[in-house]
Amino acid sequence: MFNRIYLIWKNYHLNDCTAGSPKQEEYLKSIISKDSLDYSYQLKCEKLKEVNLLHDKSYLYQNKPYEYGTAWLNTSIPEDVKKEIKLIQEVA
């Protein structure tokens, strides 16, 4: 049970707030190793700019293409995960 609770927490704590749109985050994950501490905000912006993703035209935020790092974006917790959390609370 601990592993499942940890996995839910890891995936959804703070509603998975990110500095980037899904496309920006996907690209950055593809070029940055999980163990790397070398990528500062500025370097991430430079890498996104190189591939024309600093402003994600496919993701509108306040009716404009989203610029990486200008807001905290969140991902809603899926309904099935919410139900699972409630079941875990009832068991605990």
Image (cartoon, rainbow, N blue to C red):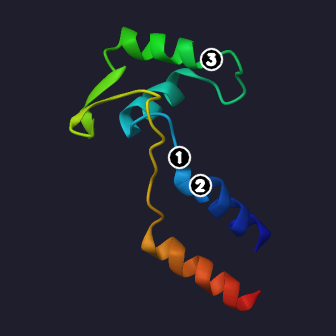
Q: Secondary structure at mark 3?
A: loop
Residue 55 x/y as whole percent = 31, 23
Q: How far apart, in angstroms, are the residues tagged by discs 1 and 2?
A: 6 Å
User: Is 42 left, or right, of 60 in this rendering?
Assistant: right
Q: Amino acid at mark 2?
A: Leu
Q: Determine the residue positioned at 41% across, 30% down.
A: 24
Marks 3 and 2: in contact by CB < 8 Å? no
Residue 14, numbered label: 2
Q: Image quadrant for the N terminus? A: bottom right
Marks 3 and 1: in contact by CB < 8 Å? no
User: Is 62 left, or right, of 3 in this rendering?
Assistant: left
Residue 57, numbered label: none
Number of marks? 3
Residue 17, numbered label: 1
Marks 2 and 1: in contact by CB < 8 Å? yes
Q: Amino acid at mark 1?
A: Cys
Q: How far apart, in angstroms, are the residues tagged by discs 2 and 3?
A: 22 Å
Q: Determine the residue positioned at 21% across, 38% down.
A: 63
